[in-house]
Image: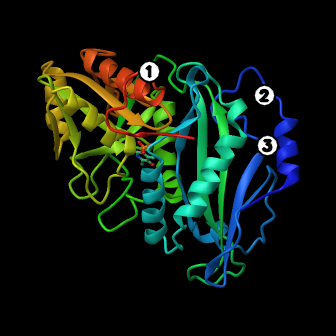
Amino acid sequence: MKVLASAKEAIENFSMPDKVGFGKVLLPIMATCEFKRGEWGELEIRPYAKLELDPTCKVLHYGQEIFEGMKAYNYKGNGPNLFRPLENFKRFNHSARRMAMPEVPNEIFVNAVNTITKMGENFIPKRSGESLYIRPFMIATENNLGIKPSEEFLFMVIASPVESYFSGGSYKVLIERQMVRACPGGMGTAKTGGNYAGALNSGVRTQKLGLHQSLWLSASDRKSIEELSGMNFFAVIDGEIHTPELTETILDGITRRSLIDIARSKGLKVIERKMSIDDLIEDIKSNKCTECFSCGTAAIITPICSLHEESGERYNVKEEFGPTTKMLRETLLGIQEQTVEDQFNWVVKL
Ligand SMILES: *Cc1c(COP(=O)(O)O)cnc(C)c1O
């Protein structure tokens, strides 16, 4: 690994605005590593800068791209620490295989993430809910319009100091009955830009209706609940926690898996199963379903207060921010911020 002197200088001269928002302020450094002629080159830490790409480069035409989203915490200066970074590394290479991209060696991924985090340590906000949002990604950089996998790639890590993504509000969710996010045999389990691009049209309709998120249903039966565009879905029914079982069309969220483990460790029953939207609507109407929430790295947990049809019909969930949702959110954030004992050994201190 090579850390350019100009990168150290960039960090030394960096001053952070008081309000950082989410994903708007970036650390003035980035990690880059090129893949060429069948092998990975040297990892470099350099000043944050624009990329120069040839207009024929394959990512611009065929969408050969993958990414990850992870966080480093420095609550009250007791970090920096990462949350389950190995899981992000494994999923990155799962995405790489699906998108016909080379796997990134553990050493390159870990060095890039750790070095960017350590160098940016002083700029990780320290209040509860705040963190450094880390974005590893890889793009196809070979220059020609031929439709075949690129033979050249660029792996990068950038990072953004973020305030709490959680506004204290809850989501109103559109039941997406027109379009699908993923199909069997497709790329739904890969974190690739195309999945997000395909979800944007639904996002626009959702916004126009004054709602916040789309809830996707299975392509096979148009009935089974899958997830939101970038978050997994949970419901509390009769005091038990239900979430759609993982299939080849649902992204295997690390937050989802962590919440299942936390809930079970607290003696709660968690049921991973096929969840029909019709049954859920009935359970919401009869108040058997008392809480719904979404989860992902960025917002951790956001309660869902209502489900909506495009026709305007709505189903209000009994509790807007219920006790199970609250307990799970506080426990997970507590582990991440090291105010709750990390019985699962999820936190990696740097
Ligand atoms: C990233 C992502 C999630 C959440 O995964 P986490 O590992 O919990 O951040 C859920 N669904 C989709 C489609 C995603 O891209």
| Colour pattern | rainbow
Where disc 3 sits, the SS reads loop
Residues 98 and 209: in front is: 98
Judge the density around disc 3: few (<14), some (14-19), many (≥20) Cα neighbours within 10 Å: many
Question: Distance between the Cα atoms at labels 1 and 3?
Answer: 30 Å
Q: Earlier in the sequence, mark 2 or mark 3?
A: 2
Judge the density around disc 1: few (<14), some (14-19), many (≥20) Cα neighbours within 10 Å: some
Q: Which mark is residue 28?
A: 3
Say what amino acid the circle numbered 2 marks: Met
Residue at 33% across / 15% down in the picture? 320
**Residue 97 rendering spot, x and y as whole percentages:** 45, 71
**Residue 32 rendering spot, x and y as whole percentages:** 71, 61
Say what amino acid the circle numbered 3 marks: Pro
Q: Which mark is residue 339?
A: 1
Q: Which mark is residue 16?
A: 2
Rendered image quadrant of residue 147: bottom right
Where disc 2 sits, the SS reads loop
**Residue 190 rendering spot, x and y as whole percentages:** 43, 59
Which quadrant holds the N terminus?
Answer: bottom right
Residue at 21% across / 48% down in the picture? 245
Rendered image quadrant of residue 330: top left
Ligand 1 quadrant in view: top left
For the residues bearing labels 2 and 3, Cβ distance under 8 angstroms: no
Q: As displayed, is residue 319 above or below residue 272? A: above
